[in-house]
Amino acid sequence: MVAPSFFEKVAPVYEFLTRMFMLGTFESARDRMLNEDTSAFSVLDLCTGTGYIANKIEAKRIVGLDQSVQMMALNDRTKRPNKTLVRGNAYHLPFEDGEFERIYCSSASHEFKLFGKVLAECFRTLKPGGKVAVYDIYQPKNKFYSLIVNTIYRYPVEHNIMWVHTLEEWRKLLTEAGFEVEELEAVRGVFVFVRARKPV
Ligand SMILES: C[S@@+](CC[C@H](N)C(=O)[O-])C[C@H]1O[C@@H](n2cnc3c(N)ncnc32)[C@H](O)[C@@H]1O
């Protein structure tokens, strides 16, 4: 996991940098994650940061969880009556079993050496039939894209503290956590889009 102090420092310029490094998918990734009616749902924006999902989604209850005080301070500038921000650790979600219909995790899976443990927490806190959606960099097999991920993203952006997985590894992580994979595909060569369902 990246040193917590990293995001405390980077928070003021985070959204500017993210727009650049998401290679034009800043809006389309979020639109794809949110392409359904969630207005009656309880949703968790896991590793919410400045509120990429939490400040856009329409839902009955929106919870944003993050460990960074500064990222959440920026997030908190957007007030929404049904939004709550919780400081916490994604490895140990401070929520009851089956609290959420949807969990979103954008641009954060690479922060975790053991993302399978985070997925297990997602599985626990989702209702049966609930879904997790993830968008992030991944480990491409293509040599050119792999070079981009493991140079440009790995060193100047992530300071060599990042963990990325191939599509096959993603499938294994999801199924080991108990999920049924609905969508798993590469986007623009260096990102992965995941949607998986907790069986009923
Ligand atoms: C790259 S940012 C992504 C923020 C937001 N989801 C987005 O798409 O812009 C990663 C976020 O993960 C948070 N984070 C990293 N490790 C965490 C952990 N163990 N528990 C909770 N949040 C964590 C960081 O504080 C940071 O806000």
Image: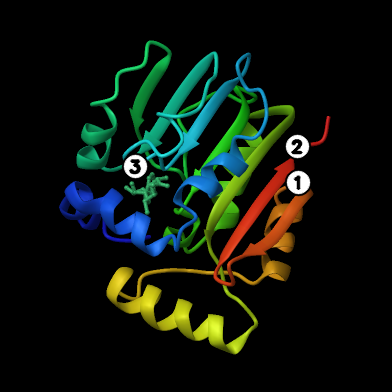
Q: Secondary structure at mark 1?
A: loop
CA gap between label 3 and label 1 equals 27 Å
Q: Cβ(mark 3) to ligand 1 < 8 Å?
A: yes
Q: Earlier in the sequence, mark 3 or mark 1?
A: 3
Q: Amino acid at mark 2?
A: Lys
Query: Is the residue marked by circle 3 packed among few (<14), some (14-19), or many (20+) residues within 10 Å?
Result: many
Taking the view exactly as shown, the residue that stands out farthest to the front is 24
Along the line of sight, which residue is nearer the eye, 187 or 109? 187
Q: Is residue 178 left or right of residue 16?
A: right
Q: Amino acid at mark 3?
A: Gly
Q: Amino acid at mark 1?
A: Gly
- Residue 198 marker: 2
Up the image or down, 175 lies above or below 44; here it is: below
Q: Which residue is mark 3?
A: 49
Give residue 89's position: percent from left, percent from top: 39, 42
Q: Residue at x 72, y 57 (%)?
A: 184
Check if mark 2's residue and mark 3's residue have beta carbons within 8 Å: no
Q: Residue at x 35, y 28 (%)?
A: 86
Q: Cβ(mark 1) to ligand 1 < 8 Å?
A: no
Up the image or down, 76 lies above or below 91; here it is: above
- State which quadrant residue 6 falls in: bottom left
Q: Earlier in the sequence, mark 2 or mark 3?
A: 3
Q: Which residue is mark 1?
A: 178
Give the foreground label among 3 and 1.
3
Query: Is the residue marked by circle 2 packed among few (<14), some (14-19), or many (20+) residues within 10 Å?
Result: many
Check if mark 3's residue and mark 1's residue have beta carbons within 8 Å: no
Check if mark 2's residue and mark 1's residue have beta carbons within 8 Å: yes
Taking the view exactly as shown, the residue that stands out farthest to the right is 200
Give residue 15's position: percent from left, percent from top: 29, 49
